Image (cartoon, helix red, strand yellow):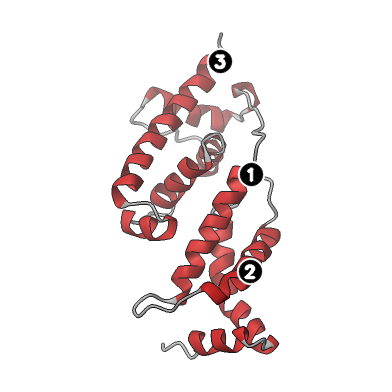
Amino acid sequence: MPDAFDVQSCIALVRKGDSPAAESLIAHLHPLVRRLVRNHLPRRESEEDLVQDVFVKIFQRLEAYEHRDGVPFEHWVSRLTVRTCLDALRAERSRPEWRFADLSEGEAEWMDFLNNHQTQEPTHHSSSDAKTIVARLLAQLSPPDRLVLTLLDLEQRSTAEISQLTGWTRPMVKMRAMRARLKLRKLARQQMKSEFQ
């Protein structure tokens, strides 16, 4: 289905101060921006607030945007959105502590599974328990580490896509992902050890 929305014409009108064109551009980009924000939302940020921050940055930087053949405007928007989320993640200074004893039975089983490299996944508890554990562990990583694992492992994006979104080279993406996974395992082990010392 061809896209009837002419992005470049709309951008030209927005640059001239055309309010209806600005509203059309927001309507066109909103689903993309909202999806990216939702996938990289810091714990303490409101989704809608972060979406609005992204649109403020889009309009502030629209004059500097230069169209390149073969590179859609949405790519520029995606990159700006991911960087805005990364900045918000960096701004999160305090990370709430959590204890093994605070976990549900299912979450505790998944934590035990992750720490002991078992081959048999817990069968009595839902995948939502696993997601909760992964989210808690990811929240303790640095924003770049959290971002690379979310993009690569949870969203199943290629290293080329991540390189385009973040501006990192592909080897850097691979290296950061490898180190982030090691840190994640170390955090899980530390969490278990601290509970029994």
Left or right: residue 82 versus residue 70 is: right
Residue tagged by mark 2? Answer: 55
Q: In front of the other: label 3 or label 2?
A: 2
| Sooner in the amino-acid sequence: mark 2 or mark 1 | 2
Q: Nearer the viewer, mark 1 or mark 3?
A: 1
Give percent across and percent down for residue 84.
57, 56
Whether residue 5 is visible: no
Marks 2 and 1, how far apart in space? 19 Å
Q: The disc labelled 1 sits on which kind of residue?
A: Ala
Image quarter where the C terminus lies is top right
Q: Earlier in the sequence, mark 1 or mark 3?
A: 1
- At a point 55% along the width and 11% down the height, the residue shown is 196
Q: Secondary structure at mark 2?
A: helix
Residue 155 drawn at (x, y percent): 43, 54
Q: Is residue 137 above or below residue 197?
A: below
Q: Which residue is mark 1?
A: 91
Tell me the crowding category of disc 3: few under 14, some 14 to 19, or many 20 or more residues within 10 angstroms, Cα based. few
**Which corner quadrant of the image does residue 54 belong to?**
bottom right
Q: Secondary structure at mark 3?
A: helix
Q: Which mark is residue 194?
A: 3
Residue pictured at 59% horizontal, 23% vertical: 100
For marks 3 and 2 on the same chain, the one whose residue lies earlier in the sequence:
2
Q: Nearer the viewer, residue 25 or 58?
A: 58
Relative to the observer, which residue lies in front, 123 or 182?
A: 182
- Residue depicted at 55% across the width and 87% down the height: 12
Indicate the position of residue 158 as horizontal and vertical percent values.
33, 56
Q: Secondary structure at mark 1?
A: helix
Question: Depth check: 67 or 110 in front?
Answer: 67
Amino acid on which disc 3 is placed: Ser
Q: How many other residues sit within 10 Å of disc 2, few (<14), some (14-19) or many (≥20)?
A: some
